C-alpha cells in the first residue's frame, strides 16, 4: 500500500443534509400560495409589485455586497424573501417606483448596514414597509378591491365583513394579507418542513384573541383582518430577528400581541402589526439573554 | 407499546450500521510490529519500564505510573523492543511509545496467570472480594473502552461518602457506523453479564441496568435472558445520538442529572461500557491484562467492513489490509465514529484501548462545506443535549470573549457535535466551543 496522507478535519465528520438555502427556498415556496391568491384578487398589480420588489431587493443586495467587497450571495434566497414579503405587504395601487425604492431601502437600511444576512436586528421587509408608510402615507393606505377604493376592514367606517370573505380573501388590504386560507397553507408547509416554530404564531395570535375578548372585540375578526395573520406566520417567524430560545419565542409572540392590541385599540394607526414586530425585534437580544435554558446538571443536588 | 427511555435534544443521523452489524467478530492475527503508546487513558502518562533491545512477553508491563489516576500498558505480543520513542498517536500528538517486533510465539508472562474467578458461569454469585476485583482491574490496565478511556479501577472506587445505587451498563452504541459493542453483546453475552456483576461488586452497586438502543433488538433479546428481578434489568432506550453519552443515558434511564462539573457517582450511578464489562470478565477469568479489543472497521471506503478482535498497538494500516483495503479513494480515515472520531493523516497510528472503530469515509459521506452566516434558526439550541446555546458560545469564542463563553456554560459542553451536525449554515460550532474550553482552562491555570 503506497504512503498516502489523508485530509484531517475536526469532528463531526458528517452533516445534516438541510442547508440555509433550503430553509430560504422553503419560505419562498410557502409564499407562493399567498402570491397566487393575491394575483387572483388583484390581478396584474400583484405580479408587478412582487416581481419589482424582489428584483430590486436582489439587485440592491448584489450591489451592496460588491461595494462592501464581500462575496455576492444573492442565491441564498434571503433577499428574494425580503422582496416577496415587502411586495405582498403593500396596497395594490402603490406606484412601481415606490416599491422599488422600498425594497432597496429594506436591503440597505434593514440588512446590509448591519453586515448582511444574520446580522440585522430588524426584519428587513418590515423596515422597508415602515419607511414606505412614513414616506408615502397616502399611497400606502389606499385600499382598493375591483378598482373601487374602500376602507380596510380595520377602519371603523368599513362596516361588517363576513368571516368567509376574511378567510378566503376578496377584501381590501395589502395584497398578501387578503386570503387567510393561503397564508395558513404556507404556514403549515413551513411547519412541516421544520422552518416555522409553532410558538411564535400561536402566542402572537393567541394573545391578540384573548386581549380582544377582554376588550369586548370580536377575536376572529381581529385575527383574520389586516396583516396580522400574514405577519404572524411569515414575519414573526423570521429566524434572524426573533429569539432563539423556546421560552423567548413565547415571550416574543405575547409581547407583539400586546403591542398590536394597544396600537389597534388606542393608537391613531389602523394597523400596528409592523411596529409591534419591529419593537419586539428590538427586544430580542434582551429576551435571548434572560431566557437562557437551564444547563444540564445546573441547580441539581448530589444525593450520593 | 412500551415508551422508550428518552432525553431532550440529540440528532438522528443515518446510522449506517448495516455495513457491519451482521458480521461476526473475526480474530485479526497479531501484526509483525506493534506500537504501544504509553498514554492510552485519561490521567498521568506511563513511564517506560523496558528499553530498546529488551525481550518482552505477551502481557508484560511495559509502562506504568505511580500516579493514582493512570493505567499500566502491557505488551500485546511477545518479542523484542525495537524502540522507545515518541510516535504519532490517534489524537495527532506525539506520545512516548514502545515499538515491539513480534516473534510470533505469543509467549505469555507467567505471573499474570492467576485468574481471580474460577467459574465462567454468568449466573454465579460473585464471592470474590471487591478489593481483589479492583486490584485485578487496575493491574490489567482496563480503561473505559467506549471511548472515554478513564481508568476503570479508579471509576469503581468512588469516594467513601458515595453510595452507588445503580450500575448502568452502556450498550447504547449511538455513534453511527460502529457495531463493535453490539457484536460483543450478541456474541459474548456471558462475559458482559459476568463483567457487569464484577463491576457492581467492586463498586458496591445494588442494581445493574443494561441500557441498549432500540435499533439493536437482537442484543436486547439475548441479554434479556440473563435478567434477574431487582438485580439485573435490560432497558431499551431511544435510538438517537448521543444516547450513549454518560449524562444523557443517566437522564434517559433514571431521570437524574449529573451535577454540572460533577461525576455520576454523585447521583448514585456508575456507567460502564459493555466492552469494558467484557474486558473485566476476560481479565478476571484468564488473568490476562487488556491487550486486545473488538473494533469495527467500516464505511463505504473499505471493501469488507466487519468486526475484528485486534491486538492493542496494531497499526491501522494492517486493519485496513485485513478488511480488503480501500474501496476507491478514501476522503477521511477516522479512529472512532463519524460524530466524535479523530481524523488520521496516515495509516501508521496504532489502535489504542479507546479505539472502538476505524472508519473510512468516501467523499460522498464526508462532504466539505464552507460555513455561511448564522441565521439564528436555533436548531443548535434545540439539539444540544446539555441545553446550551451553541450559536452564542461560537460567537463569543470567535470574538475571544472567554468570560462570556464561560458564563454561557462552555465548560458544560460534552463536545458531542450535534450542533455542528445540524447547523444548516454548516458552521464549526463545537470546534469553537472546544477552543473556548481550552482558553478558559488556560485562564484558570494562570489565576
Image (cartoon, coloured by chain):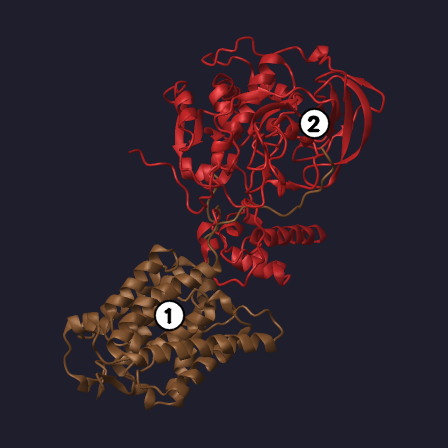
Chain colours: A brown, B red
- Is A162 positioned to the left or the right of B414 in the image? left
Relative to the observer, which residue lies in front, A64 or B162? A64
| Chain of residue at mark 2 | B
Tell me, yes or no, whether the two marked residues, 2 and 1, touch with CB atoms within 8 Å. no
A149 vs A188: above or below? below
Residue B138, how many percent across, how many down?
Answer: 64, 23
**Residue with the mark numbered 2:** B313
Residue at 47% of width from left, 22% of height from top?
Answer: B186
Residue positioned most to the right: B53
| Chain of residue at mark 1 | A
Residue at 20% of width from left, 76% of height from top?
Answer: A170
Number of on-image labels: 2
Query: Which SS class for mark 2?
Result: loop
Residue at 44% of width from left, 85% of height from top?
Answer: A101
Relative to the observer, which residue lies in front, A79 or B79? A79
- Is B342 positioned to the left or the right of A38 in the image? right
B223 vs A40: above or below? above
> In this orientation, does residue B65 appear?
no
Q: Residues within 10 Å of mark 2 (few under 14, many from 20)?
A: many
**Residue with the mark numbered 1:** A235
Image quadrant occupied by the N terminus of chain A? top right
Q: Residues within 10 Å of mark 1 (few under 14, many from 20)?
A: many
> In this orientation, does residue B119 appear?
yes
Residue B65, how many percent across, how many down?
Answer: 73, 29
Name the quadrant containing residue B302. Answer: top right
Residue at 53% of width from left, 9% of height from top?
Answer: B119
- Is A44 positioned to the left or the right of A61 in the image? left
Amino acid at each position: 500500500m503506497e504512503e498516502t496522507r489523508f485530509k484531517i478535519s475536526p469532528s463531526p465528520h458528517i452533516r445534516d443534509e438541510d442547508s440555509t438555502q433550503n430553509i430560504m427556498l422553503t419560505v419562498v415556496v410557502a409564499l407562493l400560495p399567498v402570491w397566487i391568491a393575491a394575483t387572483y384578487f388583484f390581478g396584474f398589480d400583484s405580479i408587478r409589485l412582487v416581481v419589482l420588489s424582489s428584483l430590486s431587493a436582489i439587485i440592491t443586495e448584489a450591489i451592496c455586497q460588491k461595494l462592501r467587497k464581500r462575496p455576492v450571495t444573492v442565491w441564498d434566497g434571503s433577499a428574494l424573501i425580503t422582496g416577496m414579503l415587502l411586495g405582498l405587504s403593500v396596497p395594490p395601487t402603490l406606484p412601481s417606483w415606490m416599491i422599488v425604492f422600498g425594497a432597496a431601502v429594506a436591503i440597505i437600511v434593514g440588512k446590509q448596514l448591519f453586515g448582511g444576512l444574520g446580522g440585522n436586528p430588524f426584519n428587513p421587509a418590515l423596515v422597508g414597509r415602515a419607511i414606505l408608510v412614513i414616506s408615502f402615507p397616502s399611497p400606502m393606505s389606499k385600499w382598493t378591491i375591483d378598482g373601487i377604493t374602500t376602507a380596510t376592514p380595520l377602519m371603523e367606517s368599513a362596516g361588517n365583513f363576513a368571516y368567509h370573505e376574511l378567510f378566503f380573501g376578496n377584501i381590501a388590504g395589502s395584497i398578501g394579507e387578503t386570503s387567510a386560507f393561503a397564508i395558513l397553507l404556507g404556514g403549515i408547509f413551513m411547519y412541516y418542513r421544520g422552518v416555522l416554530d409553532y410558538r411564535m404564531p400561536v402566542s402572537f395570535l393567541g394573545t391578540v384573541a384573548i386581549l380582544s375578548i377582554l376588550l369586548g372585540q370580536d377575536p376572529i375578526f381581529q385575527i383574520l383582518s389586516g396583516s396580522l395573520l400574514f405577519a404572524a406566520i411569515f414575519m414573526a417567524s423570521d429566524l434572524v430577528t426573533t429569539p432563539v430560545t423556546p421560552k423567548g419565542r413565547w415571550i416574543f409572540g405575547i409581547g407583539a400581541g400586546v403591542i398590536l392590541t394597544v396600537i389597534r385599540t388606542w393608537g391613531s394607526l389602523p394597523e400596528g402589526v409592523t411596529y409591534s414586530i419591529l419593537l419586539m425585534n428590538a427586544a430580542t437580544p434582551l429576551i435571548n439573554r434572560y431566557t437562557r435554558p437551564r444547563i444540564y446538571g445546573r441547580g441539581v443536588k448530589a444525593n450520593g | 407499546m412500551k415508551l422508550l427511555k428518552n432525553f431532550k435534544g440529540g440528532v438522528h443521523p443515518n446510522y449506517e450500521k448495516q455495513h457491519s452489524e451482521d458480521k461476526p467478530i473475526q480474530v485479526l492475527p497479531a501484526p509483525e510490529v506493534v506500537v504501544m503508546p504509553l498514554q492510552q487513558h485519561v490521567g498521568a502518562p506511563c513511564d517506560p519500564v523496558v528499553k530498546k533491545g529488551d525481550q518482552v512477553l505477551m502481557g508484560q508491563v511495559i509502562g506504568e505510573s505511580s500516579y493514582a489516576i493512570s493505567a499500566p500498558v502491557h505488551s500485546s505480543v511477545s518479542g523484542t523492543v525495537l524502540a522507545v520513542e515518541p510516535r504519532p498517536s490517534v489524537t495527532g500528538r506525539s506520545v512516548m511509545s514502545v515499538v515491539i517486533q513480534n516473534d510470533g510465539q505469543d509467549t505469555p508472562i507467567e505471573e499474570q496467570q492467576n485468574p481471580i474467578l474460577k467459574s465462567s458461569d454468568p449466573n454465579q454469585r460473585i464471592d470474590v472480594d471487591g478489593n481483589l476485583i479492583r486490584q485485578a482491574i487496575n493491574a490489567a490496565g482496563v480503561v473505559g473502552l467506549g471511548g472515554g478511556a478513564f481508568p476503570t479501577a479508579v471509576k469503581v472506587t468512588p469516594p467513601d461518602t458515595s453510595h452507588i445505587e445503580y450500575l448502568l451498563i452502556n450498550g447504547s452504541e449511538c455513534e453511527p457506523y460502529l457495531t463493535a459493542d453490539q457484536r460483543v453483546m450478541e456474541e459474548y453475552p456471558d462475559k458482559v453479564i459476568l463483567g457487569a456483576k464484577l463491576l457492581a461488586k467492586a463498586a458496591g452497586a445494588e442494581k445493574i441496568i443494561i441500557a441498549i438502543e432500540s435499533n439493536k433488538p437482537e442484543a436486547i433479546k439475548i441479554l434479556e435472558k440473563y435478567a434477574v428481578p431487582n438485580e439485573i434489568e435490560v432497558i431499551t432506550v431511544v435510538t438517537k445520538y448521543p444516547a450513549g453519552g454518560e449524562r444523557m443515558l443517566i437522564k434517559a434511564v433514571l431521570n437524574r442529572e449529573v451535577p454540572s462539573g460533577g461525576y455520576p457517582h454523585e447521583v448514585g450511578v456508575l456507567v460502564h461500557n459493555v466492552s469494558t464489562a467484557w474486558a473485566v470478565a476476560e481479565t478476571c477469568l484468564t488473568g490476562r491484562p487488556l491487550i486486545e479489543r473488538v473494533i469495527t472497521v467500516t464505511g463505504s471506503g473499505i471493501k469488507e467492513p466487519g468486526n475484528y478482535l485486534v491486538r492493542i498497538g496494531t497499526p491501522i494500516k494492517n486493519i485496513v489490509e485485513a478488511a480488503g483495503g480501500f474501496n476507491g479513494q478514501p476522503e477521511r480515515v477516522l479512529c472512532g465514529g463519524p460524530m466524535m472520531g479523530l481524523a488520521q493523516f496516515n495509516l501508521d497510528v496504532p489502535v489504542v484501548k479507546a479505539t472502538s472503530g476505524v472508519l473510512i469515509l468516501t467523499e460522498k459521506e464526508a462532504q466539505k462545506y464552507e460555513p455561511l452566516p448564522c441565521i439564528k434558526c436555533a436548531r443548535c439550541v434545540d439539539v444540544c443535549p446539555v441545553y446550551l446555546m451553541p450559536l452564542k458560545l461560537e460567537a463569543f469564542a470567535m470574538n475571544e470573549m472567554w468570560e462570556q463563553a464561560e458564563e454561557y456554560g462552555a465548560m458544560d459542553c460534552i463536545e458531542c457535535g450535534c450542533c455542528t451536525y445540524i447547523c444548516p449554515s454548516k458552521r464549526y460550532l463545537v470546534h469553537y466551543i472546544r477552543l473556548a474550553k481550552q482558553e478558559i482552562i488556560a485562564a484558570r491555570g494562570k489565576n
